[in-house]
Amino acid sequence: MRRPRWIGVLLLALAVAAIFGGLSQWQLARAVSNGEVDDQRATETARPLLDLAQPQEPLTGEQVGQIVSTTGRFVDDGYSVLADRVDDGRKGYWVVGQFAVDYPADTYVAVALGWTDDQAVAEQVAEELAAVPASTIGVEGRYMQPEDPTADSERTSDGSRPFERTMSVAALINAWPQFDATAKAYGGYIVSEAAPDGLQVISSPPPDRSVQLNWLNIFYAAEWVVFAGFAVFLWYRLVRDAWQRELEEAEENPSDATVG
């Protein structure tokens, strides 16, 4: 091991191990990201809906929780009531509206307008909103991931149709008027920052992105550590094999071989 040749190989192995260690540290930095300040600031600054997302496309992680704004009008008979909506630990009802954005044309987005713990109040507010003549207004709120649709048997007070229990854009589209084969819809929905009279503003806190773990990157970081250890181990095995060969040669030719 003290021969210049093997000292040189050791330095090379240590250099390779250092490179692998640096790659491991880089993977760990990518696996654990603290984005509390930047992400919170970004999500709470309103962005135009069309700049953030496109109709007929699924949401990405960066889009969920972002405050968005858009202009358009609510469809008169496009209001509905959702049951079993939990707000700060209390179960109640949402009033949801079908919102036709100004641009692109024939494009809609679901807007959760407000919450109440009284079914009759929710139905009354939905009826009152439907009676208001449509006009162009602005909507601002948090853009959220839709839920999966579920079958439901509970009916409204007049028994006309079942309540939906999940905020499913796909289920809402099936009930929306003015929505045909050429119409488009956004994949997510907006939780409005303002509620109509009679309803409470829906609790929609900023997404918690303070610490995010990417387990695949952690696995890669562990692999680089193993590779770094293997580089040093390989040097040891090469030296050990050379030493054993010299011992064997010394035993076969004691007068010619020099071991050490």
Image (cartoon, rainbow, N blue to C red):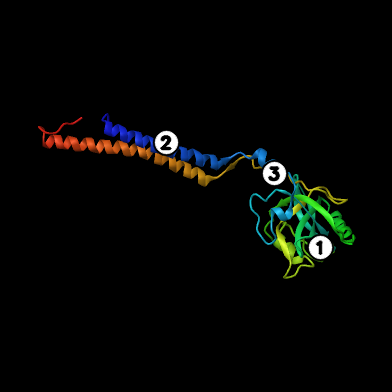
Whichever of labels 2 and 3 marks the residue nearer the N terminus, that label is: 2
Which of pointers 3 and 1 lies earlier in the amino acid sequence? 3
Q: Residue at x 59, y 42 (%)?
A: 212
Nearer the camera: disc 1 or disc 2: 2
Q: Which residue is mark 2?
A: 18
Choose between 234 and 219: the one closer to the eye: 234
| Marks 3 & 1, CB-CB < 8 Å contact | no
- Residue 199 drawn above or below residue 8: below
Residue identified by numbered label 1: 78
Residue type at mark 2: give it. Answer: Ala
* Observer-nearest of 113 and 140: 140
Residue 197 in percent (x, y) is at 88, 51
Amino acid under label 3?
Ala
> Measured from the top left, where is residue 190 in percent x and y?
75, 53
Q: Earlier in the sequence, mark 1 or mark 2?
A: 2
The circle drawn on residue 42 is 3
Q: Element at badge 3?
A: helix
- Using the numbered discs, state the Cα–Cα distance from disc 2 to disc 3 in whole angstroms: 37 Å
- Look at label 1 and name its amino acid: Gly
Q: Residue at x 64, y 53 (%)?
A: 60
| Label 1: how many Cα within 10 Å (few below 14, some 14–19, many 20+) | many
| 218 lies above or below 127 | above
Q: Residue 16 at what x, y percent from top left?
A: 39, 38
**Res 37 → quadrant:** top right
Mark 1 vs mark 2, CA separation in Å: 63 Å
